Image: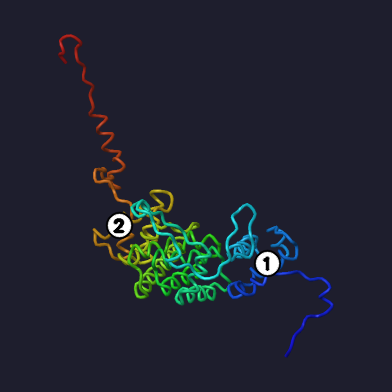
Amino acid sequence: MKYQWNGDCLSAVMALPTAVADRALKLAGAPQLKVLLWFTRHGGFDAAACAAALGIAEGDCRDAMQFWVEMGILHAEGTAELPAVTEPLSAADLPPLTPEQKTAPQAIERPSFREAVARQKESADFDYLLKTAEQRLGRTITPAEAETFLYIYDTVGLPAEVILMLLVYAVRRGKVKARSGFRSYLEKAALSWAENGITTVAAAEAELCLQERRHTVREHIEKLFSLTRPLTLLQTEAAVRWVDEWHFSDEMLRIALAKCREKTGNFNANYITRILEGWLADGVTTAEQAAAAAAPRKRQNAKPLLSDEAAVPDATDYERAVADWRPVYKGKKSGKE
């Protein structure tokens, strides 16, 4: 089927650079193209107006404009004009380092979006990472997110498969709903994995299984104790110890919580841990034993209560004692009776 422009629409036209189709069409997503068309039609950019017209977030509109700046299609006022992205730079294109630069400590520089685009062209593995990430997110990744992926891939050094496993977990747990989640969570988690040697698929699977178990225990304790606030990281670690290492039953945990609230007036994970440690030392293994151990103890130096027979003195004995009583008088000086 052949298509052609509707002649009625050609009475008013707007121009776009051919570079949009030649260089950026493959990389641009729907938000980027929509924002570019809106910008071209209005001859200027206002994030709020653009967001209202297109029905997308203001931050996404700004990210889309930054995409076209990084691609060399647009130029932001007050900044140096960037050359258009063509082919990736090679080591031969870079000036050699001076002796001072070689010996001086080098600060880690974050990659730019232009570098991410160049890396995608030269690396099939990184291209696979970005395209699969878009499928997992259900949307086109932003320039800032592409920079984050390149940072984790090249600087942190995690393989693409491991990064995707971390991304899937983060999406499922709602860690990257906000744009800042990529830097605040994904990068920190990736750095932690790299530092702890979690750089293979097998190691990542083991770590994610551990994280899933921690999440399950945390939710269980929050529900069991009817907590109104989620457990902190340290409280979650304590809860995992109660359940997975010490294997206390729910009923025993409820008894420990009741004892804790009796003494402290609130939920205190450290106090509950001390209670459970005491039970372990005393060999308390059942709810019945726990209830007995948590019951108030009598003071060892307390005097025994009188029996029912001795509680009320006999009236006859009392009258006899009164009748036999005689006062004794002593002299003030001699002391004689």
> What is the quadrant of the N terminus in the image?
bottom right
| In contact (CB < 8 Å): disc 1 and disc 2 | no
Residue 293 marker: 2
| Residue at (70, 62) in percent of width and height | 50
Amino acid type of disc 2? Ala
Up the image or down, 166 lies above or below 49; here it is below
| Residue 173 as seen in the image, left or right of residue 102 | right
In the picture as drawn, the residue positioned furthest to the top comes out as 333
Residue 109 appears in which quarter of the rendering? bottom left
The mark that comes first in sequence, 1 or 2, is 1
Q: Which residue is mark 1?
A: 36
Q: Position of residue 22 (x, y in %)?
A: 62, 75
Residue 183 marker: none
Q: Position of residue 59 (x, y in %)?
A: 62, 60
Mark 2 burial class by Cα count in 10 Å: few <14, some 14-19, many 20+: some
Tell which of 37 and 277 is nearer to you.
37
Mark 1 burial class by Cα count in 10 Å: few <14, some 14-19, many 20+: many
Element class at badge 2: helix
Q: Position of residue 90 (x, y in %)?
A: 45, 68
Q: Nearer the viewer, mark 1 or mark 2?
A: 1
Q: Position of residue 222 (x, y in %)?
A: 45, 62
Tell which of 208 and 188 is nearer to you.
188
> What is the quadrant of the C terminus in the image?
top left
Tell which of 220 and 134 is nearer to you.
134
Element class at badge 1: helix
The span from disc 1 to disc 2 (Cα, nearest Å) is 71 Å
Amino acid type of disc 1? Leu
| Residue at (25, 34) in percent of width and height | 320
| Residue at (16, 13) in percent of width and height | 335
Residue 179: in sight, yes or no? yes
| Residue 267 as seen in the image, left or right of residue 316 | right
